[in-house]
Amino acid sequence: MTVEDFRRGAAAAVVAGAGGVEIHGASGCLVHQFLADSTNRRTDGYGGSFESRIRFAVEVAAAVADEIGAERTGLRISPGNPCNDIAESDTAELYPALLRALGPLGLAYLHVMPAGEEELLGTVRGLWPTTLVLNRGGTGLPVRVKDIDNGTADLVCVGALALANPDLVERLRDGAPLNTPDPATFYGGGAVGYTDYPTHTG
Ligand SMILES: Cc1cc2nc3c(=O)[nH]c(=O)nc-3n(C[C@H](O)[C@H](O)[C@H](O)COP(=O)(O)O)c2cc1C
């Protein structure tokens, strides 16, 4: 069944050299489609109540953690985020239930893409027992760092700037200027815009 596809995919990623696997339970991906009441129209044990809608996500996380180790398994969620036309009407019940069910698995981290609902984010933070990675995509780095300073997150994620700066860590450490990402080259399918940004030292 599909849960086993996630298990096999995780195993294959590790064989290929990946240090870990992040299960995509956000932005309308399959796991999210099970969670959201706008997309999950099932009438079996995987649909209906929020207790049933979290089941697929928990089974996938358990299978992947069993296969490659919980310490190498992360999960991404986007509670209440309408990305890709997802609509969720019961996030206040669903996500706490999901996090309580996932807690005993001891996953390495939870990656959260919030939708501006700071109260829900606070609930998620309070319920999650391991590392919380916060994704405030599109905001400036100072906004993101503030989330670490005030305890909202343990780590923050950086996408486009990491793509455009192959030496991002060194640049931030040294206070060097950053390359500006070029959105025209995103999702291009080739090397341009992915492997050709210069390092600070040339
Ligand atoms: C070139 C590019 C491709 C991306 N592709 C995906 C994707 O396929 N699925 C996804 O969920 N997020 C994707 N993202 C979003 C990132 O996972 C991450 O959420 C985002 O880059 C964080 O925001 P930031 O770029 O402002 O740091 C992509 C981002 C970039 C820059």
Image (cartoon, helix red, strand yellow):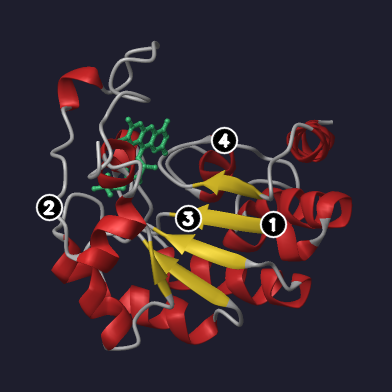
Question: Front-most of 167 and 72?
Answer: 167
Residue 158 visible to the viewer: no
Secondary structure state at the residue bearing disc 4: helix
For marks 2 and 1, the one nearer the N-term is 1
Q: Which of marks 2 and 3 is in front?
A: 2
Q: Name the residue under label 2.
A: 177
Kindly check if marks 3 and 4 are in contact, taking CB atoms under 8 A apart as contact: no
Q: Mark 3 points at which residue?
A: 77
Residue drawn at (30%, 41%), measured in percent from left and top? 83
For marks 4 and 2, the one nearer the N-term is 4
Alpha carbons under labels 4 and 1: distance apart? 17 Å
Left or right of 61? Residue 132 is left
Which x, y percent locates residue 41?
56, 37
Q: Nearer the viewer, mark 4 or mark 2?
A: 2
Secondary structure state at the residue bearing disc 1: strand
Q: Name the residue under label 1.
A: 73
> Is 115 located above or below residue 181 in the figure?
below
The N terminus sits in image quarter: top right
